[in-house]
Each structure stands twice: as structure tokens, then as C-alpha cells.
Amino acid sequence: MEKRIELEKRGRNPADIKELNLDNCRSTSIIGLTDEFCNLESLSLINVGLTSLKGFPKLPNLKKLELSDNRINNGINLLETSPKLTHLNLSGNRLKDLTTLEPLKNFRNLKNLDLFNNEATTVDNYREKIFKLIPSLKYLDGFDAEDCEAEDSDAEEEVNGNEDDSEEEGTSDEDDELQESVGLDAVYSENLDELSDEGDYEVGEEEEEEDGIEEEEDEDAAEDDAQSPD
């Protein structure tokens, strides 16, 4: 585990690390993880082979802890040094009864708890008792106290964000089309006005030409009358 921790640090100061993934690094106990990781918010120790939480460091800012698929059967009280814990996954361990889970009552910020694939889940009224034990708990094994499945809030936010973006893009396209339509209407209107003016001008010219022709015809007729003998 120590070598894996050094690898994951990548030369960074432990106090600067907020997420640490130690999945599948084989160890029966926690070694190398110290109080220096004081700003750690997410820690994953899935399928490590842990039989105990002995040596678990003080992580005051830890919010999410993944401990699934290990062999832990007690020592939950050792996690109390992480009072901000909101998500705890203990599924697939060897927790036999509710007595071993009793320390969870001290986690006042715990919202999400996974315990499936533990013998303790076979206890009568298991869910009811756990919700009563942890008043802050919202979801147990993916379902709330009313057996409603937990919603993936991150996914919902992403979808809503995409929908909002789509709506904004749609609105923008509609605005562009409207502006383009208005612009074309203005051009058409100007062209029609010009054509109308030209038409009026041509009609006026035709009327003047017709008047001139009529005057010439009248003059010619008068001359003919004057020249013809009585």
C-alpha cells in the first residue's frame, strides 16, 4: 500500500491531495496513509483485502469513502475521525450484525450508506433499524426510507445543462432567423418601393407622350382644315 500511495502522490504534497484511489492494492491493514492527507475529500480502497480499519488516519475533510469488497468485520468506530463523511460504502464485507454498525450513529452528516452483501443486512427490519440509527441518512443501499431509488443528481444536472444549452442554441437560431427574415423583408420592401416609383414615373411619361401626340394630331387637323377649299 505504501508504494501505491507514493505512486498516486506523483510528487505532490499530501495536504494538496483531495482525491486518492488505492483500489486493488493488496493489504490487510492501512499502512502509509497518514494524517498529512488532511484535505483529502475522497478515498477509495475497493478490493484491497482489508480485514481491519486499524491505523485509519484522521481525515477531517473526508466526505466520500469506498471500502467495498474487503473483509472488514469490525472497527467502524475508527472512522469517527472523519466527521464530514457523507458517503460510505461498506458493501461486500463481513459485517455480521447491527452491533458492529452501532458506531455509525455518530456520523451526523452521513447521507449515503451501502451495506449490501453483508450478513448484517439479513437481520429482521434491517432497513428500518439503520434509518433509525442514523437520522441524517437519506439512502441505504441505493434506496430511501420509502424504498424509492436514489436519483443520480450529477447525471440530472448534466442533462439539464445540455437541455438548457440546446434551448439557448435554439433560441439563438430562432433570433438569427427572425433577424434575417426582417432584413429580407426590408430589402424586398425597398425594392418594391423602387419598382413602384419607377412604375409611376413610366406611367407619367407615357401619359405625357400621349398628350403630346394628341396635341400634334389636333394641330395637323387644324392645318388641313385651313388649307382645304370651302
Image (tube, rainbow, N blue to C red):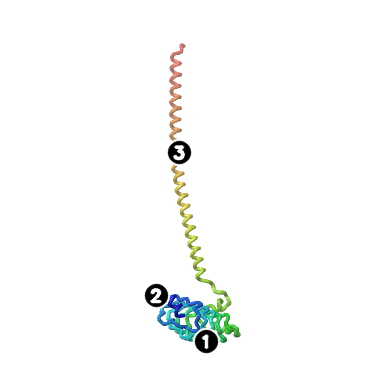
**Looking at the image, which residue is at 43% across and 39% down?**
194
Q: Secondary structure at mark 3?
A: helix
User: Disc 2 vs disc 1: which is toward the camera?
Assistant: 2
**Looking at the image, which residue is at 39% across and 75% down?**
12
In the displayed structure, would residue 196 be above or below residue 123?
above
Mark 3 neighbour class, 10 Å CA radius: few under 14, some 14 to 19, many 20 or more: few
Residue 49 - label: none
For marks 3 and 2, the one nearer the N-term is: 2
Q: In this view, which residue lies farthest toward the bottom?
A: 99
User: Disc 3 vs disc 2: which is toward the camera?
Assistant: 2
Q: Nearer the viewer, residue 65 or 166?
A: 65
* Labels 2 and 1 touching (C-beta < 8 A): no
Type of amino acid at the residue the image marks with label 1: Asn
Residue 91 percent location from the top left of the image: 55, 80
Note whether residue 70 is visible: yes
For marks 2 and 1, the one nearer the N-term is: 2
Residue 23 percent location from the top left of the image: 50, 77
The residue tagged 3 is 195
Type of amino acid at the residue the image marks with label 3: Leu
Type of amino acid at the residue the image marks with label 2: Arg
Residue 41 percent location from the top left of the image: 44, 77
In the displayed structure, would residue 212 be above or below residue 142?
above
The residue tagged 2 is 12
The residue tagged 1 is 74
Note whether residue 111 is visible: no
Q: CA distance from mark 1 to mark 3?
A: 93 Å
Q: Secondary structure at mark 1?
A: loop
**Looking at the image, which residue is at 45% across and 38% down?**
195
Q: Is residue 118 left or right of residue 79?
A: right
Q: CA distance from mark 3 to mark 2?
A: 76 Å
Q: Secondary structure at mark 2?
A: loop
